[in-house]
Structure formats: structure tokens, C-alpha cells
Image (tube, helix red, strand yellow):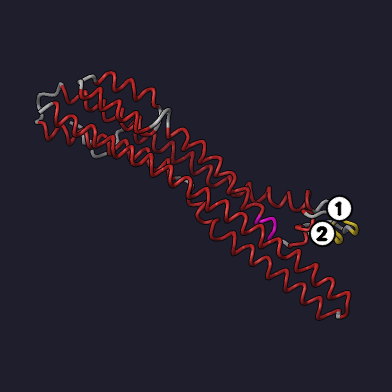
């Protein structure tokens, strides 16, 4: 008899495929977002037509002067701005990715109602109807429940094991199915939690760099014109802080939304396992 405490070949292949796909997204998406952040900063905000005194030499970081729009002023916030824009794009990318994944994992209909429906079918010893309900649910709870029910159905006709051993086999099957589902739910949330902390610090870092540049000009030039440039430089530097705080706020809010949704699905999975083991122990002593 196979060791049910270890993943089967099919389950291991599915887990490996999910891990490979997740690693690819986690590797390429941040790089692409940072590059996109630089492109937006350099070629959209930093377009020569947005300035009264553009730098004709161009290059990696053109010294344009006289921004003509509110958002264009972010360009003069410095080289930290494209990193912050890239961080915001990373947050938005993984927010969309997690929304799609968790929506799929939640499945169709209400999880609590689905579990009650399965409990009703099992109480009437209608395992096939319970399996059909799992196919309709199509979420993580349904997947775990279906794996457990398949083993449940197999154990009904098994004459070699006693009830406790049968319940243990069902429990192991549920644990294996759960081990496949939970990593998919929690994957990539680390990007949101990390950026939630780092974005604010990056914004403050960009602001400090801008303040250093502004005060350096004040010390070199002096006079009323230098004071005007100082106030303008401080205003531009604070765009870093605003962008960093805004990015951090979005990441924190969405991280909490996702963890709350995942907790609900996890609770449903736990309740599914309890339902199957208790039902079998009660109906097939």
C-alpha cells in the first residue's frame, strides 16, 4: 500500500508546475516594473516638451528645468522617483495577480453553504452527490474536499483496514491536498508586505537627497533667487515622500484584504477535513 504521507507523482508534478510558474512571475515582474518605472520617468514625465528649459544633451538623467505641469515636477524629484514608480507598478501587478488567484481559489458560491451541502449529502450517505457539489464549487475548498471524498469513497469498500485506519487515510489525503492549495494562496504576498515597509523609506531617502541638493545650491549661490530655488527644490523633493507613502498605503491595504480572504478559505479547508473525518467515523463504524 502506498505511503499516503508523501505526495503522489501526480500531486508532486502539479506542485512543481505551480512553483515553476510562480517563480517565473516573481522573477520577471519586479524587473519589468522597475524598467517600466524608469521609462515613465525618463520618457513620459521627462519628455523635453514638458519643460521650459529642456536639456538638449538628453542621456540617462537629463537636467531639464522649468517643469510645466504638476505631475511633471515629479521628474525633478531625482533618480529615486523611477524606483518608486516601479514599486507602485509591482504592487499593482501583484494585486491583480492575487485578486485573480484568490477569486479562483474562493470558487463559486458561499463556502459555508457548500460545506453544509456536503454535510447533508454525507449524512444521507450520498457520496456521489457530494462529489458533484465539489465539481460545482471549483475552488480550493472544493478541491480539498473532492480529494478527501475520493479517498472517503474508497475507504467505504475497503475491508482490510479498521475504522481508525480508514479515518487516518482520509486525513492524510486531505493534508496532502491542503499542502498543494495553501502555498498557491499565500504566494507572492511577500512582495506586498516588503514594499509596504520599503516604499516609505525609499520616499524619505529620495526626499533627503533632494533636500541635500537644494541646500547645497543655497550655500553656493545665496540671495533671494537661491531661496526661491530652495523652496521649489523642497517641493519637488516631497514628491518622493508622497509617492512612497501612497505606494505603501496601497500595499498595506491590499495585503490585509488578501490575508483576510485567505483566512476565510483556510478555515473552510480546515472545516472540510473535520467534516469528512467525523462523518466517516459516525457513518461507517
25 left or right, relative to 50: left
Where disc 2 sits, the SS reads loop
Residue at 15% across, 21% down: 157
77 left or right, relative to 121: right
Residue 251 in the image: x percent, y percent? 55, 52
Q: Write down the residue under mark 1.
A: 48
Residue 211 in the image: x percent, y percent? 72, 72
Towards the viewer: 159 or 127: 127
Q: Write down the residue under mark 2.
A: 62
Residue at 76% across, 65% down: 235
Decide: is 167 above or below 227.
above
Residue 271 in the image: x percent, y percent? 28, 37
How far apart are the two marked residues, 2 and 1, measured between alpha carbons?
9 Å
Towards the viewer: 159 or 243: 243
Q: Is residue 81 magenta?
A: yes
Q: Which residues are magenta?
A: 80-84
- Estimate how packed mark 1 is, as few (under 14), some (14 to 19) or many (20 or more) residues with alpha carbons within 10 Å: some
Whether pointer 2 and pointer 1 mark residues with C-beta atoms closer than 8 Å, the reply is: yes
Name the N-terminal-most of marks 2 and 1: 1
Amino acid at each position: 500500500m502506498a505511503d499516503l504521507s508523501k505526495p503522489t507523482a501526480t500531486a508532486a508534478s502539479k506542485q512543481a508546475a505551480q512553483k515553476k510558474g510562480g517563480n517565473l512571475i516573481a522573477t520577471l515582474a519586479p524587473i519589468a516594473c522597475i524598467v517600466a518605472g524608469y521609462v515613465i520617468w525618463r520618457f513620459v514625465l521627462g519628455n523635453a516638451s514638458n519643460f521650459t528649459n529642456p536639456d538638449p544633451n538628453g542621456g540617462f538623467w537629463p537636467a531639464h528645468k522649468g517643469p510645466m505641469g504638476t505631475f511633471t515636477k515629479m521628474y525633478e524629484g531625482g533618480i529615486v522617483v523611477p524606483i518608486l514608480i516601479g514599486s507602485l507598478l509591482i504592487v499593482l501587478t501583484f494585486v491583480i495577480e492575487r485578486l485573480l488567484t484568490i477569486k479562483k481559489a474562493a470558487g463559486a458560491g458561499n463556502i459555508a453553504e457548500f460545506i453544509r451541502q456536503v454535510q447533508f449529502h454525507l449524512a444521507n450517505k450520498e457520496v456521489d452527490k457530494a462529489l458533484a457539489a465539489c465539481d460545482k464549487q471549483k475552488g480550493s475548498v472544493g478541491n480539498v474536499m473532492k480529494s478527501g471524498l475520493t479517498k472517503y469513497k474508497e475507504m467505504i469498500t475497503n475491508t482490510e483496514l479498521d475504522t481508525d485506519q480508514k479515518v487516518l487515510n482520509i486525513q492524510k489525503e486531505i493534508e496532502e491536498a491542503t499542502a498543494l492549495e495553501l502555498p498557491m494562496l499565500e504566494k507572492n504576498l511577500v512582495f506586498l508586505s516588503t514594499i509596504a515597509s520599503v516604499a516609505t523609506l525609499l520616499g524619505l531617502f529620495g526626499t533627503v537627497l533632494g533636500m541635500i541638493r537644494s541646500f547645497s545650491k543655497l550655500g553656493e549661490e545665496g540671495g533671494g533667487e537661491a531661496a526661491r530655488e530652495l523652496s521649489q527644490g523642497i517641493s519637488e523633493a516631497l514628491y518622493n515622500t508622497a509617492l512612497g507613502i501612497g505606494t505603501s498605503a496601497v500595499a498595506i491595504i491590499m495585503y490585509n484584504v488578501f490575508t483576510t480572504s485567505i483566512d476565510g478559505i483556510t478555515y473552510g479547508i480546515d472545516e472540510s477535513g473535520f467534516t469528512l473525518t467525523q462523518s466517516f467515523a459516525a457513518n461507517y463504524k
